[in-house]
Image (tube, rainbow, N blue to C red):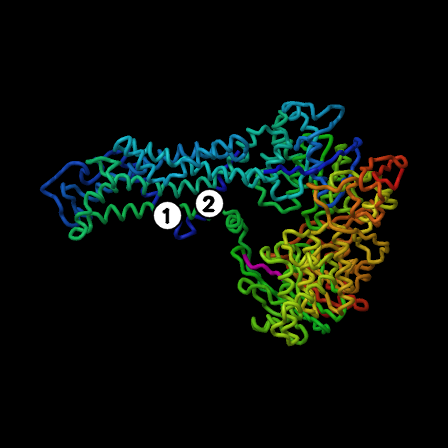
Amino acid sequence: MRKLIVHAVDGVDLNIVEGETLGLVGESGCGKSTLGRTILMLIPPTKGSIIFDGKELTKMNKEELRKMRKYMQIVFQDPFSSLDPRMRIKNQLAEPLIACGEPVNDAKLAEVLEVVGLNREHLDRFPHEFSGGQRQRINIARAIITKPKLVVLDEPTSALDVSIQAQVLNLLKKLQQDFKLTYLFITHNINVVSYMSDRVAVMYLGKIVEISDIYEIISNPLHPYTKILISSVPVPDPDFKRIREGIKGEPPSPINPPSGCRFHPRCPYAMDICKNNEPQLISIGKTHSVSCFLYK
Amino acid sequence: MFNFNNETIVTLKILVKNKLSFIGLIITSSFILLSLIITIFGYSILPYNPIESNLSEALLPPSWNHPFGTDDLGRDVLSRIIAAAPLDLQIALIVVIPSTVIGTILGALSGYFGGKLDEFVMRITDIFLAFPGLILALAVAATLGPSITNTMIALMIVWWPYYTRLARGEALSIKENQYIEASRAAGLKEISIITRHVLPNLIVPIVVYATFDLGRIILAATVLSYIGLGAQPPTPEWGRMVSETQGHLFNRWWLPLAPAATILLVVLGFNLLGDGLRDAYDPKLRQIYLAKKEVEEGIQKIPMKEIKGEVLTISGLQLIFKTPGGIIKALDGVNLWLNRNEVLGIVGESGAGKSVLGLSVLGLVPRPPGKYLGGSIKFQDKEILSLSEKELTNIRGTKVSIIFQDPSTALNPVLTVGDQVAEAVKVRLKREGLKRPSKDIVKKEVIKILNEVKLPTPEMIMKMYPHELSGGMKQRIMLSIALATKPVLLIADEPTTALDVTTQAQILQLIIDMMRERGMSILYITHDFSIIAEIADRVVVMYAGQVVESGPVRSIFKKPLHPYTQGLLNSIPSLSKIKKEITPLIGFPPSPINPPSGCRFHPRCPYAMTKCSKIIPELHEIEKEHWVACHLYSKEGGFIE
């Protein structure tokens, strides 16, 4: 049987500055979740290097990598399948401590629960006794209990009700301040990413097409895909007028990506060069990079 | 790691509550108890010696001394039956316990790690499983020679593969759970993940299967003894007793019947217990059992507002669902109206009742368990709640259509999309008088509508199956099926939630265009306020089964009146106001089984007054077309209790 290769993440160059929130946006199949997991070496990369805090992760053996996990954690999207239904909360919270050899005591566990807005009597309970929003708080508590430096947030509020989402987002912001965390915030929701991020990277079919600070990206998107993306986002304001840029065609398959610039079959500005050559990320201005032949 | 106390007590309680599993529990416990007694105290505890012959008492009929009579060697049948109990139990335990342990570990490792280990283990189990179990056991036992030990060996060899398969299957699905990935991300070693997470979650299905298995093995052991391969005389064994006395079946029927009935009873007991355990461990059932027993509140009388809509008028609609966990108050007095050529957005969070409201308009809510306690749904002067199924069919898919959130499940995977659109087209043509339209006419109409929803190359798309299309294309197909019958009212239940943002924008625009071209009315249900801002003319805000505010879209967004609407709008991030502070609502959405008294929102409301926890507020028109149900705006002294 022929092996199919999915080019999930293809030649991504990215850096995350300490203390910032880097937003990673894109639609389904763009590879953002895969990128998030690869950065933490949950999925080993096929090629390339990942340097975390000066250390090269791809060259580490299993033991060294396990020790690094203390400093880099992740919060997943689904509040229901991310907690073991048969294990009490305190035992699940204790796992990161157990894994990095730190002592576990009830005081530490209770403290982290209180920090996320729950209380110590919840330690002995089972996951099914909590609502979606509460479970997500537990997941966040588990992620910060080892006082990590980097937390990857993979769609942390997408499965929550609107009124709960705001609570969790504000909690994340407060925790970032209090514990000096660095976030990689992965989401498909542009409104949410605009609230949380300092900089934003836009992904399309395994590649980063544009990176800039959040104000630039929203007010002056350069890449044709980013323009279409921003203009497609509905906004909770019936008077918000804008010109909608239309997108052609259907989302492509990451198994058989288009040649040249991955976006060219759907791009309203596609030129001849786009069909056969892949553009590289180039700097336009201090913080703005874009990968598109329209810009030299 | 795996704490027993509370959970085991709950399991026992559920088992006892269920009559059949209670019987199973009694039978199996008695069986095990008797076996223990015989094992500890030996035959001396029995009224008669089960092994010694006593020819003077041979073949006596049932009596007070011998409830099941005596056999041809004068031995009391009842004593022999009881004496035989530990034997089969021993065999069952000696076979099940190692099989379970070996099989579970092997299967769990195989399923979890996959790869070459999995291949190797699976091929070996395949070989064993290729033989019919009992025949293989028979062959092994016959080869080794008739004895109890050899029976056990034979059964053990046959039994372990089943557990391996079972454990592997469970491990495969367990490892897909995100909590496994979370533990890996936390830095746990693989072996710790297996012992902490995989094995404890495997235990339940294994225990259930093992319980049934105890019954199966006892049966298998009695069969082997029946044939002569197991226990040898004079050791009492049920299967052997049946074969020794079956010659007496017609004149002394109690002799073979007693041991046979015992076998039946014991195996049945284990089966009933196994069934009970499986149900008791079902998480849904456990949750219902663990849920606090809610007091059944009297359903409050909800004030009705009869404003007539040109197309649809819903007044005072009350819908409950009877569930084992309590009565769910899904709709608790809904009032709304819809006119021609307008999009009415229904917005609310999960549990607000908006989806069930959409289904109610089409009479699609199953009753039971649903029950309408009051109110009315008037569509074009017809009362939906009192229409027969036939009359409803005439409205559904013709005058009123619905599109759902997930087109993958709404489309039939084994029909081409062209065929599915054609079905809808034929319904309309029939209504217009064309009972048997020709294939060409149908095809033309299908292509026409596929063009209207802007699908490229309709001729080609028609022949494709749903799985060959993208999410956006499938939703366009759904739309064309819904519109093919030229409905007056389209109900859209979160149709773009599962789509990417760029596709969503296209579909929203399409819906707006279609509405303008055809003069339809649309009931657009969503939790997303941004979509409401894009598409709705008027908005209805729902909370906990009630309408809390309703009005033109600009009024709702620019001047929200109800504290819930205000709170919600303040808590939504928007790229039109980057980094603007969002202030979340406090608290959680209420339980539909036991919602707060009075105004459902009062526990979370920053302006709640004493009145709010007692009386449900009525909808009042505060500004032109802008209605709100909140005591902050009530007219003086005009409350209905």
Quadrant of the frame with the C terminus of chain B: bottom right
**Residue on which the image places disc 1:** B24
Q: Please tell me whether residue B639 is drawn above or below residue A121 in the rendered image.
A: below
- Residue mark closest to the camera, 2 vs 1: 1
Determine crowd level at label 1: few under 14, some 14-19, many 20+ residues with C-alpha closer than 10 A: many
Q: Measured from the top left, where is residue B617 in percent x and y?
A: 70, 64
**Residue on which the image places disc 2:** B11
Q: Measured from the top left, where is residue B240 in percent x and y?
A: 23, 41
Q: Main secondary structure of the magenta part?
A: strand
The reply to whether residue B600 is visible in this rendering is: no
The magenta segment is B326-330
Q: Is residue A20 left or right of residue B23?
A: right
Q: Measured from the top left, where is residue B381 in percent x and y?
A: 67, 76
- Of residues B518 and B311, which is closer to you in this image? B518
Q: Provide the secondary structure element on which disc 2 rests.
A: helix
The amino acid type, in three-letter code, at marker 2 is: Thr
- Mark 1 — on which chain does it sit? B
- In three-dimensional space, the C-alpha distance between marks 2 and 1, rounded to whole angstroms, equals 14 Å
> Which quadrant holds residue A287?
top right
